[in-house]
Image (cartoon, rainbow, N blue to C red):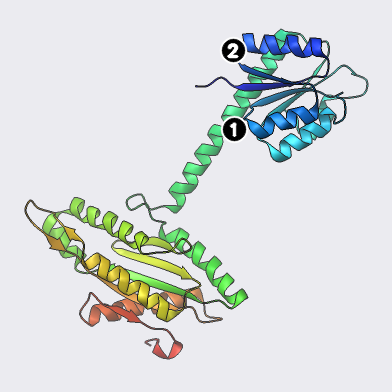
Amino acid sequence: MDAACILIVEDDAGIRDTTHAFIGMSGFEAVAAGSGEEALEILEGRAVDVVIADISLPGMDGFELTDRIKRDSNADVILITGHSAHYSYEDAISQGASDFLFKPVHFTELLLRLKRVLKERNLARERGRMLEQLQTLATTDGLTKLFNARHFYNQLSLEVDRAFRYQRPLSLLLLDIDHFKVYNDTFGHLEGDKVLVRLARIIEGCLRKLDSAYRYGGEEFTVILPETCGEEAETVAHRIKQRIAEEPFCPLENSKVMVTVSIGVTQYLATEEITELVRRADNAMYQSKQDGRNRVTALLSFSEFPS
């Protein structure tokens, strides 16, 4: 792991040079600046983990520097002052500093405080990574790596609200793999899982960046198409259907098996409930099954909604 980078900001050249040397000998990468303005220039050009700054600086003082760092950088700040009667620990922490020391600073204490700030910084990073991983697990299907059904309904709710508010088109696809139970029973669930994973990538490859695909459950997938009218959504559905139908699978040696999907297409109709939108897409997909599978069926209006 690379050594943490520490920036010392001190206008007194003697204190600055001594502190810089001590930090470097303690195993850190040390950088020094004589003013807050110089410190900000350094921060623009390199990643710094902790800034150790005097409060009394020419021009921009340590409090203003801390405010700028917390706003524009990811560094922690340790403030130092020789005016114990003018500043308090509470003043420094409320300004955004991670710690506060009075001059004269004993280097052993400075090192302990620095290590504590770095430890808390690393813990915060690890906590952030864990929360990100938990968020991913909560919204992603473990097998296909597509978003899951729960996230589908959350996102669809947002897209419906946006479509209604700005009067923009929004369409929905619902896909189901044809005869997938037969495929699983014949070749085993591991081979079936390979089909699900491959189809997920094919679906993603047919979409724009603003579109999103989901594993709805079992062998069903859904696709949300913002800024897309029903006729355009039909074109997307046919592209997906054709691309899947052209993809060979080899569940057994020297074998080639083709897989098809039935797709339902619908467009959001102003004021309708999300459940109605999803149910119409499901009815359209079911109609594709009834008509022989490997088909695209569109139900784009209330009059086309089967009772």
Report the quarter where the C terminus lies. bottom left
Q: Position of residue 107 (x, y in %)?
A: 72, 9
Where is 220 relative to 297, above or below? Answer: above
Q: Is 185 in front, or is 30? A: 30
Where is 102 relative to 303, above or below? Answer: above
Identify the residue under disc 2. 27
Choose top left, top right, bottom left or bottom right for residue 21.
top right
Q: State left or right for residue 202 relative to residue 164.
A: left
**Residue sitting farthest toward the left:** 254
Q: Position of residue 1 (x, y in %)?
A: 49, 22
Q: Which residue shows up at 40% across the image and 67% down it?
A: 223
User: Separation of disc 2 and disc 1 at Cα?
Assistant: 22 Å
Task: First in sequence, mark 2 or 1: give its number.
Answer: 2
Label 2 crowding class (10 Å Cα cut-off): few <14, some 14-19, many 20+? few
Where is 203 relative to 104, above or below? Answer: below
Q: State left or right for residue 206 relative to residue 6.
A: left
Q: Is 10 in front, or is 285? A: 10
Kind of element beneath mark 1:
helix
Q: Position of residue 75 (x, y in %)?
A: 67, 31
The amino acid on which the numbered mark 2 sits, given as a three-letter code, is Gly
Q: Which residue shows up at 68% across the image and 31% down it?
A: 43
Label 1 crowding class (10 Å Cα cut-off): few <14, some 14-19, many 20+? few
Q: Which residue shows up at 32% across the image and 76% down it?
A: 285
Q: Is 19 in front, or is 195? A: 19
Q: Which residue shows up at 83% across the image and 31% down it?
A: 63
Instruction: Kindly identify which numbered label has been placed on residue 38.
Output: none
Identify the residue under disc 1. 124
The amino acid on which the numbered mark 1 sits, given as a three-letter code, is Ala
Q: Report the mark closest to the observer, 2 or 1.
A: 2
Kind of element beneath mark 2:
loop
**Residue sitting farthest toward the right:** 85
